[in-house]
């Protein structure tokens, strides 16, 4: 029989079993460790506080800046009033015309014997364009020639009789009355000779018109006759070439139409405000859409010296050199006239004008107190982006360049900084 199992002895000192004593001993926490732990906690709390405070502070500053901006003076752009340049250019439309253009009519009646010029031919002054067959006129010239010879014979006889009677009168063989009759007969015969000579010369001159000649050098722009066409002194009576008078309403029934186009001209209507600057000799730059890239030089040769009350414009003629005859009558042209200002006008931006019930005004800046004031002005010519000011402000006056609707009289403002262009 086995002996009973022995119970381990109890540790009187610890009051525990022997197997409990085998666990590691517990070291009590020291004061230094507690301070370190507390410091770490404080640092973490501080970081959390800072991270939450900074965004709120920045937001507060932005809100404060917005409040300050709302209460601050508005920022405006300003510009100093200046005068326009000494020279200027005005562009106006015009229509090209020949320097000289004329419809050519017949002076005698007959039939067209021949013609020597057609459309597009360049002719010189005096060149024969056509010949008219007028046999009746030739017979009239012959008749007048014989009448002149007859009159001269009668004058010669009257002169001989007068000389004989003067000799007889010296011897008192004839009376004074008979001598006077012979003198009167001679004077009448001499007058008849003069009349016959004038009639003959007239018919000869008319006969010269059977040859139709060019009145000046130019180009033929219309031919309204052909061989055999019936001609009267009033013009061509038979049907013109191409079934219509290509000369237009300005020359109905004409034989030819001729235009001088080595130099062409155009008329422009200059607005009244520019009329004082339009003087003879001013240069003009001429361009036409049909000839891109080409520029022609013209000059003002004359003006009407009167304003058209209907259009309030000054009629001005510009002559243009036409090398190569490339400018054709009837072309639409753009005329840019260069002129000089005797007294250049004051110029302000069009956006600077304030149109209100009080009239046209601008905001003038008092640079001493940075305060703006409304000043009424009288405007002149409108150049688009700028406008002329006739009175109200002077040269060098500082004005608001582009005022907004919020600006009012006496408001204090700030000047916007000038930003340089970045290239």
Image (cartoon, rainbow, N blue to C red):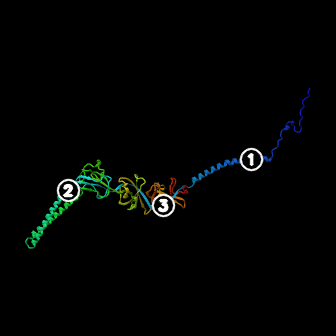
Distance, label 1 to label 3, CA atoms, is 72 Å
Which residue position holds label 2?
Answer: 138
Determine the image quadrant of residue 151.
bottom left
Residue 233 appears in the picture as rendered: no
Q: Secondary structure at mark 3?
A: strand
Q: Nearer the viewer, mark 3 or mark 2?
A: 2
| Mark toward the start of the polypeptide (2 vs 1) | 1
Q: Position of residue 17 (x, y in %)?
A: 87, 36
Instruction: Identify the residue position indicated by label 1 in the image.
Output: 40
Outermost residue, bottom direction?
171
Tell me the distance, in whole angstroms, between the alpha carbons under discs 2 and 1.
141 Å
Mark 2 residue element: helix
Disc with the residue nearer the chain's start (1 vs 3): 1
Question: Percent position (x, y) of residue 299?
Answer: 38, 60
Q: CA distance from mark 3 to mark 2?
A: 79 Å
Left or right placement of residue 137 versus residue 341 in this view: left
Frontmost residue, 144 versus 343:
144
Q: Secondary structure at mark 1?
A: helix
Which quadrant of the view contains residue 203? Answer: bottom left
Q: Nearer the viewer, residue 394 or 181?
A: 181
Q: Choose mark 2 or mark 1, whichever is in front.
A: 2
Q: Residue at x 10, y 72 (%)?
A: 167
Residue furthest out toward the top: 1
**x%, y% of residue 395?**
48, 62
- Disc 3: which residue: 82
């Amino acid at each position: 029989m086995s002996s009973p199992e022995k119970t381990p002895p109890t540790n009187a000192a610890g009051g525990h079993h022997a197997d409990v004593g085998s666990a590691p001993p517990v070291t009590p926490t020291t004061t230094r460790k507690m301070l370190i732990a507390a410091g770490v906690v404080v640092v973490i709390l501080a970081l959390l506080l800072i991270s939450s405070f900074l965004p709120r502070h920045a937001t507060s500053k932005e809100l404060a800046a917005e409040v300050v901006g709302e209460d601050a003076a508005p920022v405006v752009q300003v510009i100093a009033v200046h005068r326009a340049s000494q020279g200027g250019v005005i562009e106006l439309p015009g229509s090209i015309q020949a320097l000289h253009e004329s419809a050519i009519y017949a002076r005698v009646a007959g039939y067209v014997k021949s013609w020597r010029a057609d459309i597009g031919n360049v002719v010189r002054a005096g060149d024969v364009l056509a010949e008219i067959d007028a046999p009746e006129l030739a017979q009239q010239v012959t008749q007048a020639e014989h009448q002149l010879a007859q009159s001269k014979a009668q004058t010669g006889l009257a002169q001989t009789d007068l000389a004989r009677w003067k000799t007889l009168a010296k011897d008192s063989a004839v009376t004074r009355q008979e001598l006077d009759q012979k003198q009167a007969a001679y004077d009448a015969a001499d007058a008849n000779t003069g009349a016959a000579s004038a009639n003959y010369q007239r018919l000869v001159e008319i006969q010269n018109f059977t040859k139709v000649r060019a009145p000046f050098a130019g180009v033929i722009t219309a031919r309204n006759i052909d061989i055999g066409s019936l001609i009267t002194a009033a013009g061509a009576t038979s049907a013109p070439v191409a079934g219509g008078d290509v000369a237009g309403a300005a020359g109905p029934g004409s034989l030819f139409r001729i235009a001088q186009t080595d130099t062409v001209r155009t008329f422009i209507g200059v607005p009244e405000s520019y009329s004082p600057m339009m003087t003879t000799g001013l240069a003009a730059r001429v361009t036409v859409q049909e000839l891109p890239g080409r520029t022609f030089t013209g000059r003002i040769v004359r003006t009407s010296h009167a304003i058209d009350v209907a259009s309030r414009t000054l009629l001005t003629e510009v002559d243009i050199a036409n090398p190569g005859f490339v400018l054709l009558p009837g072309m639409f042209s753009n005329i840019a006239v260069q002129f000089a200002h005797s007294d250049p006008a004051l110029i302000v931006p069009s956006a600077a004008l304030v149109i209100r019930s009080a009239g046209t005004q601008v905001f003038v800046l008092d640079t001493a107190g940075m305060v703006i004031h409304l000043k009424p002005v009288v405007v002149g010519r409108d150049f688009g982006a700028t406008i002329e000011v006739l009175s109200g402000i002077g040269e060098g006056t500082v004005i608001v360049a582009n005022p907004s609707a919020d600006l009012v009289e006496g408001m204090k403002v700030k000047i916007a900084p000038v930003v340089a262009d970045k290239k």
